[in-house]
Amino acid sequence: MAAADSPSAALRRDLCSRGIRLAGKMRADVVDLLDAYVEQQGLDASASVEAVEGVPLAAVERWDEQTGTQRLLENLAAYRAFRALLAQMLEEQREQLGEADAGLGRALAAVLLQVSAFAYHLEELLRLESRGTPDEEEDGPPPPPRLSLFEQKLRGLGVLRELAQWAVRSVRDLRQLAKPSPATGAAPSLAESP
Amino acid sequence: MFSRWNWVACGFYLVLNICSPDASNGLVQSCGHIIPESPVLALGSNFTALCILNESCLDFGNIYASQIIWKIKNKLVPKEQYREINRTVSSVTFNDTSSLATPLTCNILADGQIEQNIYGITVTVGLAPEKPKNLSCIVHQVSRFTYVMTCTWNPGRHTFLDTQFKLRYSWPEEDFPDCIPKDVNNSCTITDIQFFVNTEIWVEATNALGKAESDHLVIDPVDIVKPLSPQNVSVSSGVLPTVLQLSWENWISNAVMALKFNIRYRIAGDTNWMEVPSEDTASPRTSFSVQGLRPYTEYVFSIRCMKEDGEGYWSDWSEEKTGITTEDLPSKGPAIWRIIDRSHSPASWTVHLIWKALKPFEANGVILQYEVTVRDKSSLSCPVKKYNVTSTNHTLQLPEGTYEVTLIARNSVGASPPSVLLIPASNSKAPVKNLRTLPKHDKLWVGWTAPNSYVLKYVIEWCLVSSSSDCIMEWQIAQGDVQGIDLKGIKPFKCYLITVYPLYADGQGSGQSVKAYLKQDRPSKGPTVQTKKVGKAEAVLTWNHLTVEEQNGFIRNYTILYKTIDGNETVVTVDPSKTEYTLSSLTSDTLYTVRMMASTDNGSSTGPDFTFTTQKFGKGEIEAIVVPVCLAFLLIVLLGVLFCFNKRDLIKKHIWPIVPDPSKSNIAQWSPQVPAKHNFNSKDQMYPEGSFTDVSVVEIEADDKKSFSEQDLKPFDLLKKEKSTSEGHSSGIGGSSCMSSPRQSVSDSDEGETTQNTSSTVQYSTVVLNGYRDQTPLQVFSRSESTQPLLDSEERSEDHSGGAESTAQRQQYFRQNGGQDETNTDRPCFERTKQITHADEGDLVGFVQLQISGQSSQPLGLGMEKNTQEAALSSVLQTCTEGQTVRPETVEENPLSVDEMPKSYLPQTVRQGGYMPQ
């Protein structure tokens, strides 16, 4: 109870709450962006896309057995990867369409900002867990190979789909973290995490 | 000599130094410069400037720092502020930069008098920026996914300098581009706002004198959102008549922001909004059922929203949408009243039932019809009569009695509760007491004291009193437990007649009435006053009451104001019921001005002025003067008559003296046949010979004209005709006058021959007269009764009818009182004196008695040959014709005398008591 009443606990709870809502909004925006992107890029919404390289899969086995730090680190790695991919997509988008479709570019920029914001939330939470944030260079995805235009479009579609899934998972992770559990706040548990 | 040339050379060098271009340092080679160069100074601070002279100027021009003077915009700086640091440097110090202006120049006095500018700088004075305050931000939702954040702040005091403001915001690990305000310095809008991340926001202000930063604001932009108002609001009727269903769409998804709502509504046409309790709409939703509404009523709805937790701002109200609730049963029966007309027959009533249409919130729908049921309570056997009416009145012919009228309003859903009105045979119950009114702003409060008995309802009737139209009644029903109501729609300055009837369970009380005004004003005009009767000292004034439209209030009194032209005004107050007033104690024969004023509680109006003049004499005064005067006159007349009667003999003697009869004169005795032939009347016999000399002249009454017959007047007309050709006829013998017998003056009459004979047989005589009244006659004539012709010449002259020779036809005349016409002795005529007649000259001439002898047109009279006398003669004749009294016996006698004495001549008399034949 004392931990719950401390400023760090309140800040953690606030960060979790805000992160949950941000993830929710990010999912809604990404879903809307997906529709716009598919239509804009002339893709088939039902097209299957292979996993994006450099992005951890949102689906994971034994999700409920993960520690809080483990969840935060996986989320942070994923969203840093998304931030880089989205920034690349935004640059490619501007190269391809210029200012012809500013709406899609603005939506991509907005999602990119949300991803950045969510990554900030995760870093703050990790900081509250007394766990430093890993360097971005270490965990960042390798530079993407040079792709054709169609491959870029397909990769973009895959990034957005994966981001949408990650948004759902992030909501669940943060809700799990927000629960007052002795294991989540214990440093040893974090230390046990890989 | 050397010194002069030296100074001239020095000045020339200075000019060259200042003005000539220099290859190494630009266009101008200055003799010095100022430090600092164009400084920006804080307002109110102190400032020191240095003017440094070039060494070259010192060597050649003998210019030293001691010669430096400082100027601010051509205004010399006091030398107390100078300081000579060394021979080339001079400083000036200002304790307060507010006294500085641009430019600040360093000058030198060459040769002690010639002022030369060395250098100048521009000084800028201002303030450092203040710390921006009151930073606040709001996130406006522009579209479904677009939000912009606008921050505003207080920039602080004016700095007089170019100050840059920028809005900065950042995440802990990420900075964003600054927001630079455009055209303003107190707000800026950020377009790339991300929710759910605490954002640090602050404002920086920078100018040449410094930099200031506002407090940092750390907020999640989602907490300061003003969302767009709900869209596509629709209203639909529910199953219940008191419910309407609202639905709408939100611009923000629940994933981003959970919303709460406000719903407001009002009746269409009303301006007052009602709100659904906020706790009912505190959760996210897209529809809501508003309950507790009135049936069949149009409502207007509007919705707004904000973040569910109350952070942020309410959106604007959505567009208004209307909806109508469904119909329901009328909630109450219409208020009903009646007007009973008994004018046709006391035993049969014409009952006008009137009722008020239900208000919308009472009707709860469209009233399709009214059902009127009339039941005769005095006769149980009479069937109940029902009427279906679509209007709000119904007229019945009912025998006198007690009736119960029931009224039901019906709409598409059903019928209203019944309204019952009892119409008793007579309003014998107790009336209300102490009926009174009181204006309350635009309403007129009517109050009363309830009777002792229990009253079901009160009916208040009122109508606008008008002089030109009937009282159009309005009415209202009040419940029995109230003792006063407000009447609406009452016009100011109008008179209303208000009547209150109490309605009992078993009857009706008689009405009590009162007149009232909502607001009074002074009368629109004053009464028009006029006099009904004006006397010597009093005047009765009358006026008409002002019409009720002119009164504008209760007439409290009339005021009569009257005055003479130069007198003071007298004021009399008169009761308003009067229409007449008597002013007393007025001055006789005086012009008065009177006007009248009508007064209400709020003022007075004066009518037009009316003037009248009092009479000079009072009633009876004239009679009191005239009657005695008349009586005295009558008395005098009566006495005069009596006196005349007593002295009639004397008067007769003077007025009608006895004329002696010539026939009884002595000379008549020598005419043997005369006594036998003349038929003298008895009157003639009365005169003795001794009175022969008396001559009486009769005054002809002017009014005796009628006594002449036409035949009598005819000869005179002829005479007038003849007068135009013959004038100056002398009278005949014996004082002939105009009263001479016409037989002697008309020649062509039936008796003309006789007359001719007479004229041809003029008797000549000499008349010897005694003096009349001791007067001695001037001439004595003898009269001859002889019928023999005189000289032949005389006969010949007579044969020439109208002959001009007067001497041939000699006339004789009598002159009374010894006439003075001595020159006309050849033409004797008779002339009356003025003593006899009361008439004027014309009348006097009228007494020139003419006697025309036969057919002779010889002029007769008093030498009246002149034409100027013709008119007079005509007048004489006319006068004679009118005035003379013909004695018929004389006319009748003459023919007889002629027959008997055809050749005799008798003077004729035509005036009774006047000239008598002798």
Image (tube, rainbow, N blue to C red):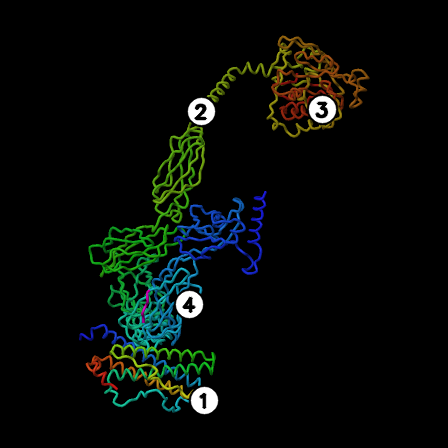
Mark 4 to mark 1: distance in Å? Answer: 40 Å
The residue where tag 3 is placed is B870
CB under 8 Å between callouts 3 and 2? no
Pick the front one: B344 or B105: B105
Q: Image quadrant of residue B309? A: bottom left
The numbered mark at residue A148 is 1
Of the 4 image quadrants, the one containing the N terminus of chain B is top right
Marks 2, 1 in one chain? no
Residue type, mark 4 in image: Ile
CB under 8 Å between callouts 3 and 4? no
Mark 4 to mark 2: distance in Å? Answer: 120 Å
Q: Is residue A189 above or below residue B717?
A: below
* Magenta stretch in the rendered image: B215-219
The residue where tag 4 is placed is B180
Mark 3 to mark 2: distance in Å? Answer: 51 Å
The numbered mark at residue B542 is none
Picture coordinates of residue B88, whole percent (x, y): 47, 52
Residue type, mark 2 in image: Ile
Between circles 3 and 1, the one closer to the viewer is 1
Q: Secondary structure at mark 1?
A: loop
Q: Secondary structure at mark 2?
A: helix
Residue type, mark 1 in image: Ser
